[in-house]
């Protein structure tokens, strides 16, 4: 006698989180189990958003608590998850020679990419002294921002971390075919049902109807960023949302 496996079906769910349209695509023999796992994964994304959002003005966000205490001399205690993220940010700061810096979010106070004005040197001058991970007092179980006005902003790694965690939830529930897509930040937790890779098209930054590359993944992650969604164009020069923390 030969056991006959139930056929796997492809399931897709969409939700809104982290300012982006998100989706989870997965396949499994038990559709109810797949949908349950997707629900748990989506809730994990929302949990991370609430915990690390710079936009929430309440104590549920550790980023809010740290930023609100800037300049007070009061250190904010960190749990193990937050410590892991801050260590990751510190390693990226070192690897990039300071170009990846989670204290650079203060620049959003003068850069408005829904407008048309470019900040002047005078606009940037008071913010630049507030930038610099090396100024943060981080001792593995607490964070202190020494200067009033300093801020932490996990926008460069928060969504990617959430995608990783959501993929982990799917795997924990036994779903090993699919991917998480959080507004273009993609984490693949297994190949297609037939073992073939998932194919993702990278949009041409100058032609919304064309792609510049197709990338195939059976696992791992894919993230792109460019100057074609958030930007200001003035006098023929395009200024994107990817800012240099050293110059603003």
Image: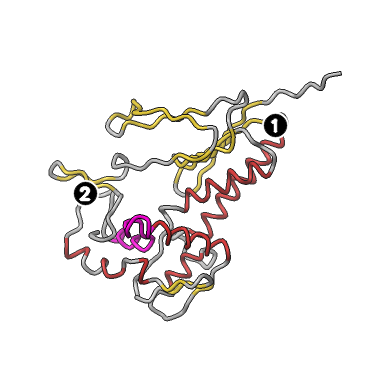
- Find the magenta span and give its range: 93-109
Q: Position of residue 239 (x, y in %)?
A: 23, 47
Label 2's element?
Answer: loop
Q: Position of residue 124 (x, y in %)?
A: 22, 63
Which quadrant, please, contains the C terminus?
bottom left
Looking at this view, name the residue that lies furthest to the right: 1
Q: Which residue is mark 2?
A: 116
- Residue placed at 53% from the left, 28% from the top? 197
Q: Which residue is mark 1?
A: 31
Looking at this view, name the residue that lies furthest to the left: 235
Residue 96 lies in the magenta-colored region: yes
Residue 90 lies in the magenta-colored region: no
- Against 174, residue 62 (above or below) is below
- Going by the image, does 220 lie left or right of 230? right
> Residue 172's image quarter?
top right
Q: Give the mark nearer the N terminus: 1 vs 2.
A: 1
- Residue placed at 53% from the left, 49% from the top? 162
- Residue placed at 47% from the left, 53% from the top? 158
- Against 220, residue 90 (above or below) is below
């Amino acid at each position: 006698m030969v056991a006959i496996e139930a056929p796997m079906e492809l399931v897709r769910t969409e939700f809104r989180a982290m300012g982006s349209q998100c989706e989870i695509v997965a396949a499994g023999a038990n559709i109810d189990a797949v949908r349950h796992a997707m629900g748990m994964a989506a809730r994990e994304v929302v949990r991370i958003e609430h915990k690390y959002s710079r936009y929430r003005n309440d104590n549920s966000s550790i980023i809010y608590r740290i930023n609100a205490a800037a300049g007070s001399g009061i250190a904010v205690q960190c749990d193990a998850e937050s410590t892991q993220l801050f260590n990751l940010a510190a390693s990226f700061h070192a690897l990039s020679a300071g170009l990846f810096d989670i204290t650079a979010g203060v620049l959003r106070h003068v850069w408005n990419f829904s407008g048309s004005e470019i900040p002047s040197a005078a606009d940037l001058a008071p913010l630049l002294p507030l930038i610099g991970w090396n100024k943060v007092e981080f001792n593995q179980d607490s964070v202190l921002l020494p200067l009033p006005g300093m801020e932490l902003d996990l926008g460069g790694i928060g969504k990617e971390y959430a995608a990783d965690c959501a993929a982990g939830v799917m795997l924990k529930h036994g779903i090993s075919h699919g991917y998480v897509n959080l507004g273009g930040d993609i984490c693949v937790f297994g190949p297609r049902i037939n073992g073939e890779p998932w194919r993702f098209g990278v949009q041409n930054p100058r032609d919304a109807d064309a792609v510049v590359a197709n990338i195939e993944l059976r696992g791992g992650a894919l993230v792109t960023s460019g100057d074609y969604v958030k930007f200001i164009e003035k006098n023929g020069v395009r200024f994107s949302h990817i800012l240099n923390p050293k110059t603003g």
